Amino acid sequence: MITKFLRFQSIFKQVSMSFAMVLSLIAPSFAEVLEIKSFGHSSFLIRGGGHSVLLNPFKAVGCAKGLREPNVIPDIILASSELADEGYWRKKGVFFVKPGSYRIRGLTLEGFSTAHDHVGGRRFGYGTFWQWTQGGINFAHLGGIAGSLDPQDKLLLGRPDVLFIGVGGGAKVFTAKKAANIVDELNPRIVIPVQYIRGKKPSNCDQTDIQPFLDVMKNLEMIKSGTNYVLPSKLPERTIINLMQ
């Protein structure tokens, strides 16, 4: 009787350990689910990993004219500059726009500075681009800048899992060709193009639509995920372009 009880106890312990191991493998996949919501222009909300991060909230002016302004309350806001179309925010949340290294509730944010125009900052000054890891995913946001990245910038950015990059050209945004060169150098897993014209072009906007960028990057796979995108549990090894609305 005692022998049977001990044998049952041993089997129960093994089953319990196996179940615990399975839960430890499954639980992170649920905990680390990340969703990206697009508001257009260069503004996105990233939710997951215990945080909600809003990128480049805007006022519907300039090239963002006609878009619906973000109406969310995130934990953290990252902006490229304080211009109305990429750094307009009057609601709750911790707002970061200046370059530097920040840590808030376990999330480390790195902001780097480069020219906001194609003439070394002489026209529009400097903008901030961002790198951070959220829910185990390495993000980089290169909207709102047009200057070159130096070798140290590229080293610090590493290989992004998700890269937001301006592609529409004009005075304050990467040209399609320059954006394509940066994509080639950083080799991200997922590229989400930003700051290009969707639909009717506002009269006072100098940006192009997405086509020049797609023409340069025609060898890459492209998907369309609409306004909401849940990151897959297994990220692609080769770069793909995700066109979000």
Image (cartoon, rainbow, N blue to C red):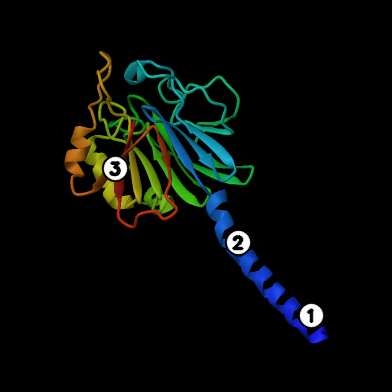
Tell me, yes or no, whether the two marked residues, 2 and 3, touch with CB atoms within 8 Å: no
Q: Nearer the viewer, mark 2 or mark 1?
A: 1
Q: Earlier in the sequence, mark 1 or mark 3?
A: 1
Image: 47 above or below 22: above
**Callout 3: helix, strand or loop?**
strand
The dot on residue 223 is: 3
**Callout 1: helix, strand or loop?**
helix
Q: CA distance from mark 2 to mark 3?
A: 32 Å
Q: Is residue 28 left or right of residue 128?
A: right
The dot on residue 24 is: 2
**Callout 2: helix, strand or loop?**
helix
Image: 232 above or below 62: below
Q: Nearer the viewer, mark 1 or mark 3?
A: 1
Give the residue type that dot 2 points to.
Ser
The dot on residue 220 is: none
Q: Is residue 159 left or right of residue 119?
A: right
